[in-house]
């Protein structure tokens, strides 16, 4: 028992000195060891999964109005880090570590709606992913989830049409009221607002699991 106590004390002192003398390079240019990245990913994924478990997904997540609203906010809030159709890279994305997921390059089936909602609302520490919950309604966040689910089906031209006229952050972009929330699946086929096209393949969404995670 005395030997174990001594080992633990030695590890604690060593760790404290490691931190105090700045041995660890906090710069984003110095990448984690592979084992460190693996452990951090497990910690992140489990933390998100547990906390997103009780999130309730809206019945009409594929609603065209909701998707169109999410497009505007995605352009203003997300495209700089997560990129957009037709954008392969930018200075911000290049400099971020860890680099955020590029949604238009992955299928909706690779992510989980509940987890995407929780991440957008709560953010992720030490990744550059902000918590949008304090400044945005749940409806606005669900609109973003709905749009992200369609991104891999949207061409660069379609994306430009959907976000045309975006000149600043749209805090009222929710666009789906209580009546919409009670709508049937037929609403998912309604026409998008004037000047915007509903992305193809809206009915293909599945509620199966991101990284992303954002």
Image (cartoon, rainbow, N blue to C red):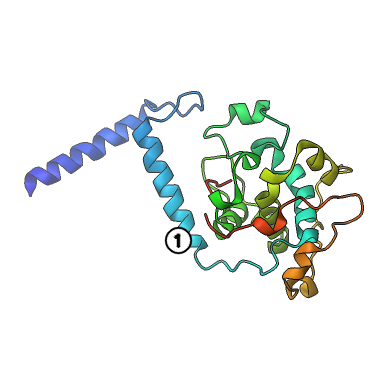
- The picture places residue 108, in percent across and down from the top left corner, at 60, 51
User: Does residue 168 appear anywhere in the picture?
Assistant: no
- The picture places residue 137, in percent across and down from the top left corner, at 71, 61
Left or right, 145 with respect to 168, comes to left
Residue at left 61%, top 66%?
A: 57
- The picture places residue 150, in percent across and down from the top left corner, at 69, 50
Residue at left 61%, top 27%?
A: 94
**Mark 1, other Cα within 10 Å: few <14 / some 14–19 / many ≥20:** few
Left or right, 167 with respect to 70, comes to right
User: Does residue 138 appear anywhere in the picture?
Assistant: yes
- The picture places residue 54, in percent across and down from the top left corner, at 52, 68
Query: Which of the 4 image quarters holds residue 193?
Result: bottom right
Image vertical order of residue 68 relative to residue 19, above or below: below
What kind of element bears circle 1? helix
Left or right, 52 with respect to 203, comes to left
Left or right, 184 with respect to 50, comes to right
Return the residue at label 1: 50
Residue in the foreground of this view, choosing between 163 and 85: 85
Residue in the foreground of this view, choosing between 51 and 9: 51
Residue at left 73%, top 46%?
A: 74
Q: Residue furthest right?
A: 194
Query: Which of the 4 image quarters holds residue 35?
Result: top left
Residue in the foreground of this view, choosing between 69 and 209: 209
Q: How many marks?
A: 1
Residue in the foreground of this view, choosing between 26 and 81: 81
């Amino acid at each position: 028992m005395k030997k174990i106590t001594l080992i633990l004390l030695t590890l604690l002192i060593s760790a404290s000195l490691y931190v105090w003398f700045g041995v660890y390079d906090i710069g984003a240019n110095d990448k984690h060891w592979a084992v460190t990245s693996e452990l951090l990913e497990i910690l992140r994924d489990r933390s998100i999964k547990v906390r997103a478990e009780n999130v309730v997904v809206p019945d009409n997540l594929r609603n065209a109005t909701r998707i169109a609203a999410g497009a505007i906010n995605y352009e203003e809030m997300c495209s700089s880090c997560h990129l957009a159709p037709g954008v392969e890279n930018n200075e911000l994305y290049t400099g971020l570590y860890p680099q955020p997921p590029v949604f238009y390059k992955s299928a909706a089936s690779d992510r989980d709606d509940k987890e995407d909602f929780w991440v957008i609302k709560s953010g992720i520490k030490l990744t550059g992913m902000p918590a949008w919950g304090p400044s945005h309604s749940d409806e606005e966040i669900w609109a973003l989830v709905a749009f992200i689910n369609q991104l891999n089906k949207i061409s660069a031209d379609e994306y430009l049409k959907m976000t045309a006229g975006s000149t600043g952050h749209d805090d009222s972009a929710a666009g789906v009221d209580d009546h919409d929330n009670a709508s049937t699946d037929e609403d998912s086929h309604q026409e998008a607002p004037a000047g915007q096209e509903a992305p193809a393949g809206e009915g293909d969404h599945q509620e199966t699991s991101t990284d992303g995670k954002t």
